[in-house]
Image (cartoon, helix red, strand yellow):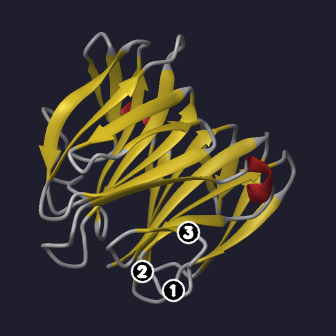
Amino acid sequence: MIESRPFASLGHADHGWLKAAHHFSFAEYRDPSRMGWGALRVWNDDEIAPDTGFPAHPHRDMEIITYVRTGAISHKDSLGNEGRTEAGQVQVMSAGTGIVHSEVNLEPVTTTLFQIWILPDRRGHAPSWGTRPFPVEARDNRLVTLASGVEGDEDALTINATARVKAATLRAGSAVQWELEPGWSGYVVLASGAARLGDLILHPRDGAAIRDERALTIHATQDSEIVIVETIG
């Protein structure tokens, strides 16, 4: 099953400094049919204006992955961590037993990012934060695992969930094979470009929810960037 989630069908919010599109129910956007996909609970497509951002606020028992598309985001938290994650990089935060953090755009340009929340494998993990650059050229025409809680994915940032976050940059006319393990579901968002997932045409920032599929081919009809979350269930 492949279910199309066009960008226009998402929940949209405009807070002035923040323009957000919600793939799943979040904040004031409520859709009982879009409460999550497997262990994936939130996928927000955010545009954050310069010199603005999310002030310090708390979280607990959630794995939060930030995929920066353009610009950069600056992080501070109650553990004493500080860092700047720019386009092409990924940061992960395990909220665990509790963490307070801020995410601010200190750049002179709008920052765009995907904010992805995944339910942890259990409650009560120790909170943590980490970031790592993943060179875009390493994803050229192949899927690379950026964050994972699965054994064997040691090159990825660690999360406390049976899940993976993957990405690829595809040249126009190229294709990549994607296989889901039995019992796993997938959620795909086309960050940019134009591509075909099986028979489904994806336009920029469209999503697709996948279940009970094993082998799929992603064809790029334009230079494209694609992000995938795989989870159990």
Residue found at the very far right of the displayed protein? 173
Separation of residues labelled 3 and 2 (CA atoms): 19 Å
Separation of residues labelled 1 and 3 (CA atoms): 18 Å
Contact? badges 3 and 2 (CB < 8 Å): no
Quarter containing the C terminus: bottom left
Residue drawn 87% across the image and 50% down it: 173
What amino acid is labelled 1 in the image? Answer: Glu
Q: Nearer the viewer, residue 73 or 196?
A: 73
Contact? badges 1 and 2 (CB < 8 Å): yes
Q: Nearer the viewer, residue 35 or 125?
A: 125
Q: Which x, y percent locates residue 60?
A: 14, 57
Q: 175 above or below 38?
A: above
Pointer 2 residue: 184
Label 3 vs 2, first from the N-terminus? 3
Q: 200 above or below 19?
A: below
Contact? badges 1 and 3 (CB < 8 Å): no
As drawn, the label of residue 161 is none
As drawn, the label of residue 181 is 1
As drawn, the label of residue 156 is 3
Q: Which x, y percent locates residue 106?
A: 44, 19
Q: Secondary structure at mark 1?
A: loop
What amino acid is labelled 2 in the image? Answer: Trp
